[in-house]
Image (tube, helix red, strand yellow):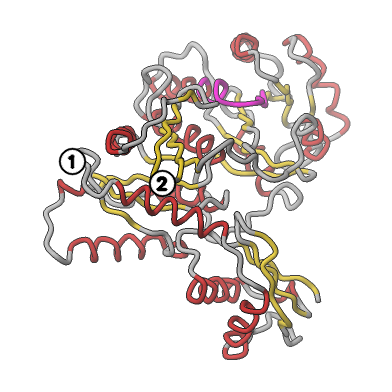
């Protein structure tokens, strides 16, 4: 199941970032299960009344400005609108309806996307009448709210998510393992896909994917059908170079949502960069088994210790995600590209793995006895038993007397112990504590 993509657009200084942060930071709106998630980005996952969606924050929308910065903002907003499932058109109650607002409304009508007109800075009931002016836009009923103080946010989220489906199991692929080939622009994603297709003995005719710009290329590997989703290629040449990254981000989110395994392609000469880490975090948030593919390895000067040292440096940068496998390849020379397929199949099986309750408790309870949890309160925490309650993604419940007192550091300890004894290479684990 792909979560709906919702873009916030509007002219500068109407409060887009404030609304973005309010929705993502609201206690009832979102809970991030994955620790260590980077916050300095313009997208995030939100949840409201059991419905999840991805929220995109754009820069100020200035349709006719010749300023280079405003051109970049305008293009970014256009990209977000074209890629989104719904649009929040944010306006300013204090300044009223402006010519720029009307120009933006005209662009939104052309997009034929569901548009929610939201009038910000209505911080009290006495200001509600200010939203009525915005009926002139002809985009439906304006919703009034105060993003800074949170007034009206819940009522608006009810409207926004009314047509969204409640979170359920992700739709299974018709056949095979869907692999998202993702990464920064120009790291060799398409070259890798082409190398894999060219190297395969059995090639299925490429079939169009559900996303406009990607093609799913089917390839067989040891009786396993893999559908490779290449996210490279813009729908149209970008006028502003900075927005290639923004567009790539939206495409990456879409592709990860559609797939079973994520292959993050890196440039060997550049290493693991900040944007690569954001992609990894997105895959982890969505609980997708993930591998790192270091491409252009043929361009690196090396000796017998280079790959070991390089992998160690990458895993150090990954921090809490140091369980991801690393594969060194050259898409250009086809060196070790089959290792990508081999690792992908292995990760898919790891994600489906189930540990018997008796085996799990015999092993993990011994580790808990050796290192019991320290309480953040005055009461002692006693973990009674554990069970794997789900696979794909693997989810483990630990039953104890005081679930709310278990510290995050102990959750990571249990995560490490599960990996040490049962594997789960490349697979994010979900650990929950429940009252016995």
Judge whether 338 appears above or below 197 on screen. below
Judge whether 418 appears above or below 220 on screen. below
State the CA–CA distance, disc 1 to disc 2. Answer: 19 Å
Percent from the top left, x then y, of residue 405? 72, 76
Marker disc for residue 263: 2
Percent from the top left, x then y, of residue 120? 72, 30
- Marks 1 & 2, CB-CB < 8 Å contact: no
360 or 47: which is nearer to us? 360
Q: Is residue 43 left or right of residue 98?
A: left
Residue drawn at x 40%, y 37% is: 219
Residue drawn at x 28%, y 33% is: 198
Residue hosting label 1: 333
Over which residues does the magenta segment extend?
Answer: 78-89
182 or 271: which is nearer to us? 182
Q: Residue 222 lies in magenta, yes or no?
A: no
Q: Is residue 229 left or right of residue 354?
A: left
Earlier-in-chain disc, 1 versus 2: 2
101 or 312: which is nearer to us? 312
Figure quadrant of residue 68: top left
- SS class, disc 2: strand
């Amino acid at each position: 199941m792909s979560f709906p993509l919702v873009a916030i657009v509007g002219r500068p200084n109407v409060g887009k970032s404030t609304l973005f942060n309010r929705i993502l930071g609201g206690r009832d709106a979102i809970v991030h299960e994955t620790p260590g998630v980077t916050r300095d980005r313009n997208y995030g996952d939100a949840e409201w009344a059991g419905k999840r969606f991805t929220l995109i924050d754009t820069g100020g929308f200035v349709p006719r400005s010749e300023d280079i910065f405003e051109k970049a903002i305008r293009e970014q907003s256009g990209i977000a609108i074209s890629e989104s499932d719904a649009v929040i058109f944010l306006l300013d109650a204090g300044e009223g309806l402006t010519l720029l607002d009307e120009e933006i409304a005209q662009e939104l009508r052309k997009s034929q996307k569901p548009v929610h007109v939201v009038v910000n800075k209505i911080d009290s009931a006495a200001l509600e009448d200010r939203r009525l002016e915005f009926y002139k836009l002809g985009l439906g009923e304006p919703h009034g709210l105060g993003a800074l103080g949170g007034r009206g946010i819940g009522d608006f989220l009810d409207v926004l998510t009314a047509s969204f489906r409640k979170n359920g199991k992700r739709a299974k692929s018709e056949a095979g393992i869907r692999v998202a080939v993702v990464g920064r622009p120009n790291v060799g994603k398409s070259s890798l896909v082409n190398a894999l297709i060219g190297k395969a003995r059995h090639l299925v005719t490429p079939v169009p994917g559900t996303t406009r710009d990607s093609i799913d290329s089917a390839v067989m590997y040891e009786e396993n059908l893999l559908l490779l989703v290449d996210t490279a290629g813009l729908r149209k040449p970008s006028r502003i170079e900075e927005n290639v990254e923004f567009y790539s981000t939206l495409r990456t989110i879409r592709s990860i949502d559609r797939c079973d395994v994520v292959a993050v392609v890196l440039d060997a000469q550049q290493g693991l960069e900040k944007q690569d880490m954001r992609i990894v975090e997105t895959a982890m948030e969505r609980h997708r088994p993930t591998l790192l593919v270091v491409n252009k390895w043929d361009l690196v000067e090396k000796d017998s210790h280079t790959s070991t040292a390089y992998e160690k440096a990458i895993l150090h940068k990954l921090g809490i995600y140091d369980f991801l496998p690393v594969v060194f390849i050259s898409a250009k020379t086809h060196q070790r590209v089959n290792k990508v397929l081999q690792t992908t199949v292995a990760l898919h099986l790891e994600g489906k793995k189930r540990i018997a309750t008796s085996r799990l408790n015999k092993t993990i309870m011994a580790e808990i006895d050796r290192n019991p949890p320290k309480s953040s309160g005055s009461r002692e925490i006693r973990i009674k038993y554990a069970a794997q309650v789900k696979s794909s993604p693997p989810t483990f419940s630990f039953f104890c007397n005081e679930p709310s007192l278990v510290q995050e550091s102990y959750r990571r300890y249990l995560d490490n112990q599960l990996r040490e004894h049962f594997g789960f290479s490349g697979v994010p684990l979900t650990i929950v504590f429940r009252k016995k």
